[in-house]
Amino acid sequence: MNKFFRTKSYIAIIVAAAILLLIFFHWLNILKPIENLFTTIFAPVQEPLATAGQKINNLFTSFKSLGSLKKENEKLKNEIEKLLVENYRLKTTIEESKLLEEQLKFAQEQNYRYVSAKVIGKSPSNPQILIINKGEKDGIKVDFPLIVNDGILIGKIIETGIHVSKILLITDSQSVISASIENEDKSQGIVKGEHGLSLKMDLIPLDHKVNPEQLVITSGLESNVPSGLVIGSVSKTFSRKGELFQQANITPATSFSNISIVTVIVI
């Protein structure tokens, strides 16, 4: 074992001495002819090697740049998505503010007491029942009417909780509203919902002349519903032989598919 270590020590000394000798010869320019010879021999391959090295370096740089671009692209994508969400929320807030302003203007002009509310959901058992974020604590009671826009009736309160209430839309089959037509006779009757799709007015006196496009409004005969709230307009009239009354199909004054802000008229 000692012999092995002694041999390794001798080799290290010899290598060190050879390196020192080469450095000394280089300093004295003794090795210059040999160095020039090696330079001449390897000159043809220096340029391809340098070019290859540069290409490899460029390749690694490209990979690095690609990774940076991917991260930057992902960051920009997230920022765009965030801006789209913020833009949608801002747009929704502006639209709701305009709707609320219109509703409140109407209520104030009519000297109604009112409570503004936001639709927060629908009944899972009946899409014609909406849920709002105001309830008994806000003075809301069953049968209070709700309007949108400038006095368009959309339904009545059918159930209240402390902080929430349920609305039955006038298009529901269970909805019944006392109404009148803005014709010469001020024809009165009742408006019923038609399977959540449309409206029909019944009990219109047979001898009253009713024309298409005539406005249908609340008659004020219900204790909690003031007169003059807009329901819709007449689309056509019809009657059955032997009946004392005629009926009319009513086109609702608003769409019920995307209601977000409502005003409850507190009588």
Image (tube, helix red, strand yellow):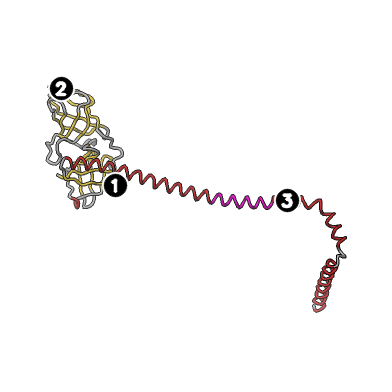
The residue range painted magenta reads 56-71
- Marker disc for residue 120: 1
Label 1: few (<14), some or many (≥20) within 10 Å? Answer: some
* Residue 60 within the segment the image draws in magenta: yes
Residue contact at pointers 3 and 2, CB within 8 angstroms: no
List x then y, in percent, for residue 144: 17, 43
Instruction: Check disc 3 and give the amino acid type.
Output: Ala
Residue 196 falls left or right of residue 74: left
Query: Closer to the observer: label 3 or label 2?
Result: 3
Q: Residue furthest front?
A: 28
Query: In the rendered image of this protein, does residue 91 appear above or below residue 5?
Result: above
Label 1 and label 3: CA atoms lie apart by: 67 Å
Label 1 and label 2: CA atoms lie apart by: 42 Å
Query: In the rendered image of this protein, does residue 97 appear above or below residue 253?
Result: below
Label 3 and label 2: CA atoms lie apart by: 96 Å
Query: Closer to the observer: label 1 or label 3?
Result: 3
List x then y, in percent, for residue 235: 23, 26
Q: Residue at x 44, y 47 (%)?
A: 81
Q: Residue at x 84, y 54 (%)?
A: 40
Query: In the rendered image of this protein, does residue 92 appear above or below residue 25?
Result: above
Q: Residue at x 20, y 48 (%)?
A: 160
List x then y, in percent, for residue 183: 15, 26
Residue 48 falls left or right of residue 261: right
Residue matched to label 2? 209
Snapshot quadrant of residue 114: top left
Residue matched to label 3? 52
Quadrant housing the C terminus: top left
